[in-house]
Image (cartoon, rainbow, N blue to C red):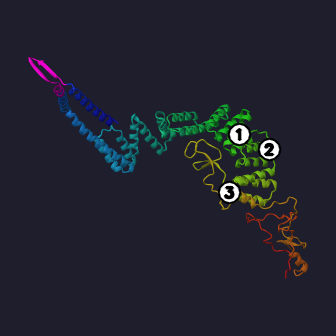
């Protein structure tokens, strides 16, 4: 842009001179000069031209005199600039060598740059020396150089960064915290310093200081607005958890502020509800939980909502669970909440219906364990219980609070592994792999329900395990055939009995309602090697049978 302005100015000057000469040429005249008795007369054009030439000559002579006068300084400046350029070239080569891990070349280039450039004028020389010392393993010298840089206002941030890294390497976490806090107080826009200081303050439980530092980061535009609001909501939730027992009103205010910043933050809603319960304000507690439930259904929300009032009966808890289901219908967590409450209220039909509906939505461990509890409470059928337990073993695990591979039973504001803020997520742990996935159009829940064994009749007469255990000669039933132990096998009557099925069947070939199998479920499905099926293997009879 400057070059273009200079060119335009030059063309404007030429145009102005040309216009001036043309104007004078159109108005001819003479100029007369009487000086010391002499009379000088010349034309106007000649006089103007001579004047312009005189000005040009004077300017040229002035430039020559100025150049001769300043030539020693110009020569010194030329050689100094040349030396400085060589020094910066050596410094650049040394920094590249340090980044590549070539300590020998970095040290040699540092010495050359120091001989060409003064160290007090170029702080990068100290940086190169410190990097070379770190590569060579001379950490004491590196810390000394970082300390010198931290005392210089121009390199203070870089020196504190080096001292912070060295302190962490040595395990001096208190010293690292101090260096990070110094850098964060002087320059809150430094991401590493602000992050480290924030983590240290969170670990110490200084939530107010952490919130103040986070606000400074937001003002310095280190964090985006949505990220800063999310982290502030997490800090306010952690503060509310610490205040809950001693100051329920303060915990309530902090949790509500967190919910304004992050409307789907489940722990904040739970803390706010607990604070309202401490104030005996059940209506506000339920309303807070309902608002978050509409956005993000969660098992902990359902548990807090259903058990908000300790004096409620099982039927009252069931009604609350049904209200949650009405707010979020056809939802996995809603159906499970109703099923669990119905099981507590001994409403087995509703519990089974809701649990089976949840299993069709998502095939997970929790729903199958719940179905096993329903079977145990309602029928006590060990076959069906084992069936659901087997499905639970094969099903994907349920979500949990996970942060950096660590699984926790409760939410925490920071990760216990890395100290990262807002690290916990509600998801399936990585180390808990899902069960086998089978191809097909039917879901896993539908397959599990379809493969369910029949229900035992509560009033069905017990069947003897084996007829040979009885001393009296009674018929032995095996696979639908009736064999008389005392009768000869070639008896036509016994032959007819053997050919006649033991149970009546319908026209379609299926057992009738009166012929429902009442024998215990033996290992099908899933297979149970601990139970022997008497229809397949029978013990040696006490009464010898004559079959031939």
Mark closest to the chain's N terminus, 1 or 3: 1
356 drawn magenta: no
Q: Secondary structure at mark 1?
A: helix
Counting from the top left corner in percent of width and height, residue 530 is at 75, 65
Q: CA distance from mark 2 to mark 3?
A: 29 Å
Range of magenta residues: 28-50
Of the two numbered discs 1 and 3 in the rendering, the one whose residue sits closer to the viewer: 1
The residue lying toward the viewer, choosing from 77 and 430, is 77
Q: Which residue is mark 2?
A: 314
**Is 42 in the magenta?**
yes
Alpha-carbon distance for marks 2 and 1?
A: 20 Å
Q: Residues within 10 Å of mark 2 (few under 14, many from 20)?
A: some
The reply, left or right, for residue 334 in relation to residue 160 is right
Disc number placed over residue 395 in the picture, else none: 3
- Looking at the picture, how far across and down is residue 543, in whole percent? 86, 76
Contact? badges 2 and 1 (CB < 8 Å): no
Determine which residue is flagged by label 1: 290
**Which residue: 88% across, 59% down?**
459
Q: Quadrant of the C terminus?
A: bottom right
Could you say whether the residue bearing mark 3 is in a helix, strand or loop? loop
């Amino acid at each position: 842009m400057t070059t273009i302005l200079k060119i335009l100015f030059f063309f404007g000057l030429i145009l102005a001179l040309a216009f001036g000469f043309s104007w004078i040429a159109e108005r001819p005249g003479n100029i007369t000069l009487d000086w010391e008795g002499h009379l000088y007369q010349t034309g106007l054009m000649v006089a103007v031209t001579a004047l312009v030439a005189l000005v040009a000559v004077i300017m040229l002579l002035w430039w020559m005199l100025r150049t001769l006068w300043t030539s020693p300084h110009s020569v010194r400046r030329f050689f100094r600039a040349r030396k400085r350029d060589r020094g910066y070239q050596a410094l650049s080569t040394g920094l590249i060598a340090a980044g590549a891990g070539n300590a020998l070349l970095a040290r040699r280039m540092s010495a050359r740059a120091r001989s060409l450039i003064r160290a007090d004028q170029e702080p990068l020389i100290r940086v190169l020396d410190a990097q070379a010392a770190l590569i060579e393993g001379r950490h004491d010298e590196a810390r000394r150089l970082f300390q010198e840089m931290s005392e210089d206002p121009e390199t203070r941030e870089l020196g504190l960064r080096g001292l912070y890294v060295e302190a962490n390497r040595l395990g001096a976490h208190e010293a690292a915290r101090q260096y990070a806090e110094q850098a964060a107080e002087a320059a809150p826009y430094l991401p590493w310093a602000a992050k480290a200081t924030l983590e240290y303050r969170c670990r110490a439980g200084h939530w107010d200081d952490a919130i103040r530092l986070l606000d400074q980061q937001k003002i310095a535009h280190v964090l985006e607005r949505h990220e800063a609001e999310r982290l502030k909501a997490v800090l306010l939730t952690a503060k509310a958890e610490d205040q809950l027992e001693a100051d329920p009103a303060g915990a309530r205010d902090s949790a509500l502020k967190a919910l304004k910043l992050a409307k789907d933050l489940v722990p904040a809603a739970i803390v706010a509800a607990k604070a309202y319960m401490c104030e005996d304000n059940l209506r506000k507690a339920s309303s807070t939980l309902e608002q978050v439930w509409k956005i993000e259904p969660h098992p902990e929300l359902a548990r807090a909502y259903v058990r908000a009032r300790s004096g409620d009966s099982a039927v009252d808890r069931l009604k609350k669970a049904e209200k949650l289901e009405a707010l979020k219908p056809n939802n996995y967590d809603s159906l499970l909440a109703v099923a669990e409450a119905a099981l507590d209220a001994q409403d087995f039909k509703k519990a089974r219906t809701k649990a089976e509906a949840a299993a069709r939505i998502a095939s997970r461990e929790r729903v199958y364990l719940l179905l096993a509890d329903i079977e145990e409470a309602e029928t006590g059928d060990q076959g069906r219980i084992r069936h659901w337990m087997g499905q639970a073993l094969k099903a994907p695990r349920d979500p949990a609070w996970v942060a950096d591979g660590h699984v926790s039973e409760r939410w925490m504001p920071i990760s216990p592994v890395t100290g990262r803020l807002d690290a916990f997520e509600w998801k399936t742990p990585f180390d808990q792999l899902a069960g086998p996935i089978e191809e097909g159009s039917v879901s896993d829940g539908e397959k599990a329900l379809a493969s369910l064994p029949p229900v035992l009749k509560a009033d069905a007469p017990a069947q003897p395990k084996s007829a040979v255990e009885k001393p009296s000669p009674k018929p032995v039933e095996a696979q639908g055939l009736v064999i008389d132990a005392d009768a000869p096998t070639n008896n036509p009557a016994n032959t007819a009995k053997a050919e006649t099925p033991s149970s009546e069947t319908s026209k379609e070939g299926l057992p009738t309602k009166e012929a429902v199998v009442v024998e215990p479920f033996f290992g099908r499905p899933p297979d149970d090697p601990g139970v022997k099926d008497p229809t397949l293997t029978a013990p040696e009879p006490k009464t010898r049978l004559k079959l031939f």
